[in-house]
Amino acid sequence: MVNRILRRCALVSYVLIIFFILHVSIWTATSPSEQKTSLLWSFAAITGAENQRKLVAITSDSVLYSGDKFKLMFEVRQTLFVYIIFAGSGGEIVLLHPTKLDSEIQPAAINTPVFIPNEKDWFTLDQKRGTETLYLVVSANHLADLELLLKRYEAASLNDKDEIAQTIIGLVQEKNRVIQPLTAAVEKPIQIGGTIRSISERGLAEADISKFTQSIDIEDLFIRIYSIEHL
């Protein structure tokens, strides 16, 4: 009788252990950090002397030189509106995304990588030196105030564009000041897969900048500002 009870206890213990292992495995496979990932983001540059070109991640305060190239990529995992604004050293701004300011701007396509520029093209820094700034603004909702200003800038005359551009940048910076205490909590470290050296003249495939992909968790609004010193 005692042996039978012990065997039953051992069987029950074995079943409980198997259940626990399976439960932990399932939880690990769908961990909260993976479920929350709502934006994949990569921003990279090709820099260096002609015979020592290398691919590097662009950080919030980077130094690049005339002739250097840069490219960016994003992919959303949930419904999000993505605004990417590039401000040149002369005060002009270029809306990199969305490319069209329709009457009703649509959210970015889910689970679809977007490379800017497309294919194997890269942006190249010209000879005009100064501070270039890229603003990444991601929101769970339409940013009607920002969209209105961007549409005004697109339709404005050359004489009026400078003032509207300053208003746009001021609005983004003000939104950033409001959410700044929350921003650090949703960022994950940049995953660097190494530097690519001896870059061929035919350039790099889009996938190469994925080596620097960063995952970001966004609930409402996320802003990152890259200040690039163009020497």
Image (cartoon, helix red, strand yellow):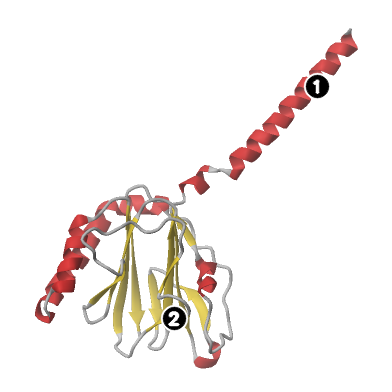
Q: Kindly identify the residue that appears in the image at 53 percent across and 87 percent down.
A: 202
Image quadrant where residue 116 sits = bottom left
Residue 104 % position (x, y): 23, 58
Residue 207 % position (x, y): 53, 71
User: Is 175 or 41 nearer to us in this picture?
Assistant: 41
Residue occupied by mark 2: 121
For label 2, the SS is: loop
Q: Check disc 1: other Cα within 10 Å, few if <14, some if 14-19, many if 20+.
A: few
Residue 64 % position (x, y): 40, 81
Name which of mark 1 and mark 2 comes first in the sequence: 1
Residue 11 has which mark? 1
Amino acid tagged 1: Leu
Q: Quadrant of the C terminus?
A: bottom left
- Real-space CA distance between mark 1 and mark 2, rounded to the nearest whole angstrom: 63 Å
Q: Kindly identify the residue that appears in the image at 32 percent across and 48 percent down.
A: 220
User: Is 106 or 33 nearer to us in this picture?
Assistant: 106
Judged by depth in the image, the label closer to the viewer, 1 or 2, is 2
Amino acid tagged 2: Asp
Q: Kindly identify the residue that appears in the image at 41 percent across and 51 percent down.
A: 78
Q: Check disc 2: other Cα within 10 Å, few if <14, some if 14-19, many if 20+.
A: some
